[in-house]
Image (cartoon, rainbow, N blue to C red):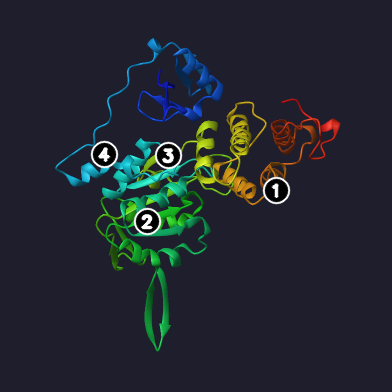
Amino acid sequence: MKDEIFGTVTTEDGEFIKVVSTDGNDITHLFRDDMIKIAYKEGQGLKYNEETGRGKRIDLDDVPAPKPPKKEIVNDDPVLAFINNAPSIKPDHLEITDIKWKYLIRSAVRGKNIMMVGPAGSGKTEAAKALPTATDRPFFYFNLGATQDPRSTLIGNTHFKNNETLFDESAFIKAIKTENAVILLDELSRAHPEAWNILMTVLDEGQRYLRLDENINAPLVNVAPGVSFIATANIGTEYTSTRVLDRALMDRFEVIEVDILSKEREHVLLGKRFGDKVEDGLLESVADIADVTRKEWRSDEGKLSTMISTRMTVRICELLADGFTLEEASEVGILPFFDASGGADSERLFVKQVIQKHLGTADEDIFNVGEEEKVEL
């Protein structure tokens, strides 16, 4: 099944025991140490179910044969070869699947428009910013969600001096005139509709120009060859400051959905960033607390209208690295994001109980929860 990962137990230097998947990847982190040691002693293999998040020991005969190592794709077309070898230049800290990273790389080298959608804090902007560095291309960033005057931001300003009309072109115009540039249009779903109207011809494959004025005879600025636009958008009912994107605008993009990380992938990501500063047990706790809120948020009858994002887990770990306890970091870095109204049914109380239970202090009332407010998890 596609949601199952198989591995065999081996050793390094006769001391360190690790688990290697049939793809040749190290998947030791997916299994408990005691399970790995027993499997090694009994000559067994291991299987991990991504959907349930559980691992088990199995007979070696049930472990599929290892897949042949991937060969580097060699092609006479250097651009095609670069696209197919995209996973080799993916940043180690970036938690995005190889296929979606390859899609991003392809969009840049082919001058396509990509829209990255997903929950707030899921890593859309980080992935988009990693793209120009990996491809060694000029990069320009525009936060459209913070734009109050779209025409001034995207086109420029006209002013008069010494009875002469002067035009100061915007940074956006300079960006679209830069060959092979990667232009990030962050928070596109929060932009003013006038910004969308200005961008229509810029993003259209058959037009690719910016008109400096609404007059049909106004000068045009053509988009330089190889320019790729990467937009980020929060789409969904929980994002109250977003607007419903115009379908004509949406059709100018190829869409990539950014995944919500599983508990295991979140733990690995936090380990890469904070493994030398924060105890692994604390990192696992943060990943676990976040995972509970995400499952509750996605549930049809869930108690939460939002969740702990990857951006939030990183902030919590930054506090832990600066000497905060998990209790203290949760108090200031998690609870303010959840609604406190509703008494025993409040979102904040639910999250408090999750944190207390994970700290092993569910009966100690560390957040001053009254008996009448305690809820069943």
- Total numbered circles: 4
Q: Which residue is mark 1?
A: 332
Between label 3 and label 2, give the one nearer the viewer: 3
| Mark with earlier residue (2, 4) | 4
Q: The residue under label 4 is which amino acid type?
A: Asn
Q: Quadrant of the C terminus?
A: top right
Left or right placement of residue 369 versus residue 181 in this view: right
Q: The residue under label 1 is which amino acid type?
A: Val
Q: Which residue is mark 4?
A: 84
Circle 2/circle 4 CB separation < 8 Å:
no
Distance from Cα at disc 1 to Cα at disc 4: 44 Å
Q: Which residue is mark 3?
A: 96
Which secondary structure, mark 2? strand
Between label 2 and label 4, give the one nearer the viewer: 4
Distance from Cα at disc 3 to Cα at disc 2: 20 Å
Left or right placement of residue 354 versus residue 71 in this view: right
Distance from Cα at disc 2 to Cα at disc 1: 35 Å
Circle 1/circle 3 CB separation < 8 Å:
no
Residue lying at 45% horizontally and 67% vertically, measured from the top left? 152
